[in-house]
Amino acid sequence: AQSVSQHNHHVILSEAASLELGCNYSYGGTVNLFWYVQYPGQHLQLLLKYFSGDPLVKGIKGFEAEFIKSKFSFNLRKPSVQWSDTAEYFCAVNRNSGYSTLTFGKGTMLLVSP
Amino acid sequence: DAMVIQNPRYQVTQFGKPVTLSCSQTLNHNVMYWYQQKSSQAPKLLFHYYDKDFNNEADTPDNFQSRRPNTSFCFLDIRSPGLGDAAMYLCATSRQGEDEQFFGPGTRLTVL
């Protein structure tokens, strides 16, 4: 069975600091990788995704993530965070089969102080 | 806007009293999912429908059932809620052949 591990449960940063959230997955086959974000009081929404091709993917709001196959990692980055980035971030993976179910990590709560 | 809608947003029930949570979608997606998310934990898939085909996760308790009367609606029935069933319940949809899932706002269930 596949699993997803997010290294940090809580991260606190000041505005303009750089962000990197770790995500590792365990699955031997070809996978699709996702980062979802949940702003306070709102629903989960897709931040970015990797299916194939360029391992560096860019998402909304200045976020990007890099897929490193040899490390089974898909870390999320942002060069300069804003107060509005305060949210919970979930890494997720599914098998690259056109339709399969998602496995989520436990999430990382990011708090950005002004 | 096309979206996934969950009602109610907050539900309080008593221990052992059946409860039904509702999800509707205007995306016309043929796959619908129900997740349970407890505090500080990952969303956990309970079951999903691929069109009318019901797919139950192996570790989903029998206490949880689902119905999908048509493409737009899907219900989660908890027959005898226990204190451990208090959680956020998330509904999501996806289109056949695509992996991105679209989530509703969730229903927070409290069991007294």
Image: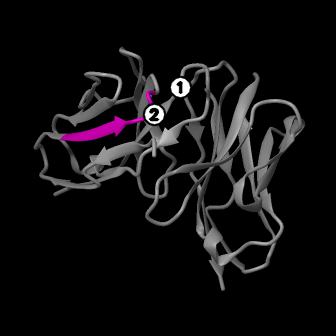
The percent coordinates of residue B74 (x first, y second) are 31, 30
Q: Is the C-beta separation of discs 2 and 1 under 8 Å?
A: yes
What is the magenta range? Answer: B20-28
SS at badge 2: loop
Q: Residue at the spot x=45%, y=33% of the render?
A: B27
Q: Examine the image and state in which quarter residue A78 appears.
A: bottom right
Query: Please, what is the three-letter code of the amino acid marked with disc 1?
Result: Arg
| Label 2 sits on residue | B27
- Taking B70 as reference, is B41 above or below it? below
- Taking A102 as reference, is A75 above or below it? below
Q: Nearer the viewer, residue A56 or B45?
A: A56
Q: Residue furthest top?
A: B53
Q: Residue at the spot x=36%, y=15% of the render?
A: B52
| Label 1 sits on residue | B95
The percent coordinates of residue A31 (x first, y second) are 73, 28
Host chain of mark 1:
B
Q: Does the stretch in magenta take in B1?
A: no
